[in-house]
Image: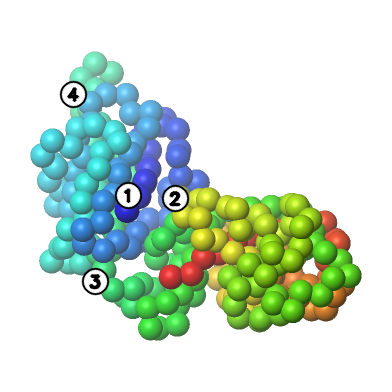
């Protein structure tokens, strides 16, 4: 699988969100053998990609002089690899080189090594169960105001408080109204992943607990995929964490989709 990472140099346009570009205390987690595409935009000069295993001693990657540049993840004595683009313009920079921000990789052998805060599978990991499974969220909302849908209709398959994926499938199959919170996640594609879903009530609470880590949330309420009754669904306010039932027809609910690993 090929993953696209981006960074910036000088006045380059930012392909990642601002938060992602600066959140380099977090690591991108990859298994050895996966391919990653390194990309820098707006670089005014020649490019030379460099790598390091400790972010202190850097070495040029032979032949890595283009953007984008695809590289295969390999193991490291530190379990990490760091990448940056060295950009040189002998005309305007007086023979000095400029460096992009550093892309940090954690090389894993199994998903049990992934921890909350890692970048993995298209977003930030905000929950792990300690056995190699967890939940991932992007850094932006997918909607700032949409209804849950099908007011007055009970959807028995959407009552789980822990399985948002199953809830989402049931909602989309039973409710033909579009768009609704679940359909937005069901049709979402971000960073090459298409298996996003509307989190269940319990999963949404994990997301609330890590809202500062993930970022990009409003203080509005966010829809869960858990039905409360035929007229209402569970929601959670991200200013105080309160979870309540709200009318399915209310069109002010925000949506943050998640995916599992």
Q: Can residue 247 be seen at all in this image of the molecule?
A: no
Asked whether 103 or 204 is in front, the reply is 204
- In the rendered image, residue 53, in percent from the top left (x then y), is placed at 17, 58
**Quadrant of the rendered structure where residue 199 is?**
bottom right
Compute the Cα span from label 1 to label 2.
Answer: 9 Å
* Marks 2 & 3, CB-CB < 8 Å contact: no
- In the rendered image, residue 258, in percent from the top left (x then y), is placed at 55, 64
Q: Residues within 10 Å of mark 1 (few under 14, many from 20)?
A: few
Tell me what residue is drawn at x 51 percent, y 55 percent: 194
Which residue bears the numbered disc 4?
95
**Mark 4 or mark 1, whichever is nearer to me:** 1
Tell me what residue is drawn at x 85 percent, y 75 percent: 230
Tell me what residue is drawn at x 70 percent, y 75 percent: 158
Q: Secondary structure at mark 1?
A: strand
User: Nearer the N terminus, badge 3 or badge 4?
Assistant: 4
Asked whether 224 or 184 is in front, the reply is 184
Left or right: where 235 falls relative to 28: right
Which residue bears the numbered disc 2?
192
- In the rendered image, residue 150, in percent from the top left (x then y), is placed at 82, 64
Which residue bears the numbered disc 3?
109
* Marks 1 & 2, CB-CB < 8 Å contact: yes
* Marks 4 & 1, CB-CB < 8 Å contact: no
**Mark 2 or mark 4, whichever is nearer to me:** 2
Which residue bears the numbered disc 1?
2
Please say if 205 is above or below 95.
Answer: below
The residue positioned farthest toward the top in the image shown: 91
């Amino acid at each position: 699988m090929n993953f696209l990472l981006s960074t910036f140099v000088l006045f380059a346009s930012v392909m990642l969100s601002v938060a992602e570009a600066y959140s380099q205390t977090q690591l991108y987690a990859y298994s050895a053998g996966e391919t990653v595409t390194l990309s820098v935009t707006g670089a005014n000069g020649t490019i030379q990609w460099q790598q390091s295993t400790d972010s202190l001693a850097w070495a040029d990657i032979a032949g890595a002089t283009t953007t984008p540049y695809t590289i295969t993840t390999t193991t490291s004595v530190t379990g990490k690899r760091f990448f940056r683009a060295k950009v040189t313009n002998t005309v305007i920079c007086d023979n000095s080189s400029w460096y992009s921000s550093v892309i940090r990789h954690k090389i894993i052998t199994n998903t049990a090594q992934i921890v909350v805060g890692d970048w993995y599978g298209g977003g930030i990991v905000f929950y792990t169960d300690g056995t190699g499974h967890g939940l991932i969220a992007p850094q932006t909302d997918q909607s700032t105001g949409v209804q849950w849908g099908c007011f007055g209709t009970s959807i028995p398959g959407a009552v789980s408080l822990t399985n948002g994926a199953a809830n989402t499938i049931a909602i989309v199959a039973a409710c033909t109204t579009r768009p609704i919170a679940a359909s937005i996640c069901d049709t979402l594609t971000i960073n090459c992943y298409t298996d996003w879903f509307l989190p269940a009530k319990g999963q949404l609470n994990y997301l609330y607990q890590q809202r500062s880590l993930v970022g990009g949330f409003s203080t509005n309420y966010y829809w869960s995929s858990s039905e409360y009754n035929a007229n209402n669904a569970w929601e959670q306010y991200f200013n105080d964490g309160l979870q309540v039932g709200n009318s399915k027809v209310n069109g002010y609910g925000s949506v943050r989709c998640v995916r599992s690993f």
